[in-house]
Image: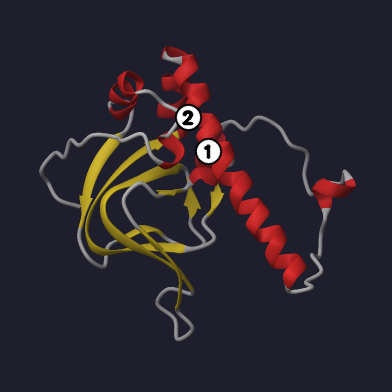
């Protein structure tokens, strides 16, 4: 990442589409901007992840098996796309690697920065969460359609059956980081 400080604008697209311009201006200072060069890894598959990223400019690849003989590009990201929206709600190991394809500017925030934003601007926080929920619902719908169209049988339908691998609870992020 470059040494110079990067400041850019957040635009009302993607998960930010419900947040008005005034609140976008406030939100941008709750997170951090960074410039990344080609080949830099933003998120590493299998590594615990705590951040939400929004791609401001440039492009990134989403990879499975990065660095192995089976490396597969499963997606391409462009301006307005987000990464880590699941980890901001439930920190855990990344399921894919995200690697910069061309010079990119990304904005990020962690769970603690998000919490401070919610405390300061709860309505804008709700608008942001609505955008994240809409994205996650869209991805879930796509996954369900893939399961049905490919006649795949999921190994565990815990949410549908009322069974969960572990009880859902508020997590202490500091304990998980340690």
Q: Is residue 18 left or right of residue 42?
A: right
**Residue 61, horizontal then vertical, whole percent:** 37, 66
Q: Is residue 13 left or right of residue 139?
A: left
Instruction: Report if the CB atoms under discs 1 and 2 are less than 8 Å apart.
Output: yes
Residue furthest right in the image:
161
Q: Is residue 150 above or below residue 83?
A: below
Does any portion of residue 53 appear in the rendered image? Answer: yes
Q: Is residue 40 above or below residue 108?
A: below
Please give the count of numbered marks on the rendered protein.
2
The residue that disc 2 covers is 128
Secondary structure beneath label 2: helix
The residue that disc 1 covers is 132
Distance from disc 1 to disc 2, alpha carbons, whole Å, reads 6 Å
Residue placed at 77% from the left, 44% from the top?
166
Question: Which of 112/79 is in front?
Answer: 79
Q: Quadrant of residue 21?
A: top left
Question: Which of 91/117 is in front?
Answer: 117
Residue furthest bottom in the image:
69
Q: Quadrant of residue 26?
A: top left
Residue placed at 77% from the left, 66% from the top?
148
Q: Quadrant of residue 104?
A: bottom left
Q: Estimate how packed mark 1 is, as few (under 14), some (14 to 19) or many (20 or more) residues with alpha carbons within 10 Å.
A: many
Q: Estimate how packed mark 2 is, as few (under 14), some (14 to 19) or many (20 or more) residues with alpha carbons within 10 Å.
A: many
Q: Is residue 113 left or right of residue 155?
A: left
């Amino acid at each position: 990442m470059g040494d110079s400080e990067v400041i850019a604008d957040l635009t009302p697209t993607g998960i930010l589409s419900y947040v008005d311009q005034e609140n976008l201006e406030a939100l941008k200072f709750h997170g951090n901007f960074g410039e990344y060069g080609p080949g830099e890894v933003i998120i590493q598959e299998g590594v615990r992840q705590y951040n939400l990223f929004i791609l401001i400019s440039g492009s990134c690849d989403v990879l499975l098996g990065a660095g192995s003989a089976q490396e597969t590009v499963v997606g391409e990201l462009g301006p307005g796309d987000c990464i880590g929206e699941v980890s901001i709600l439930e920190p855990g190991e990344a399921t894919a690697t995200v690697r910069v394809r061309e010079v990119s500017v990304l904005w990020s925030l962690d769970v603690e920065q998000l919490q401070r934003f919610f405390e300061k601007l709860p309505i804008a926080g709700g608008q942001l969460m609505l955008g994240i929920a809409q994205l996650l619902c869209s991805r879930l719908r796509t996954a369900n359609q893939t399961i049905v169209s490919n006649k795949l049988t999921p190994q565990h339908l815990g949410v549908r059956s009322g069974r969960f691998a572990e009880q859902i609870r508020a997590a202490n992020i500091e304990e998980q980081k340690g």
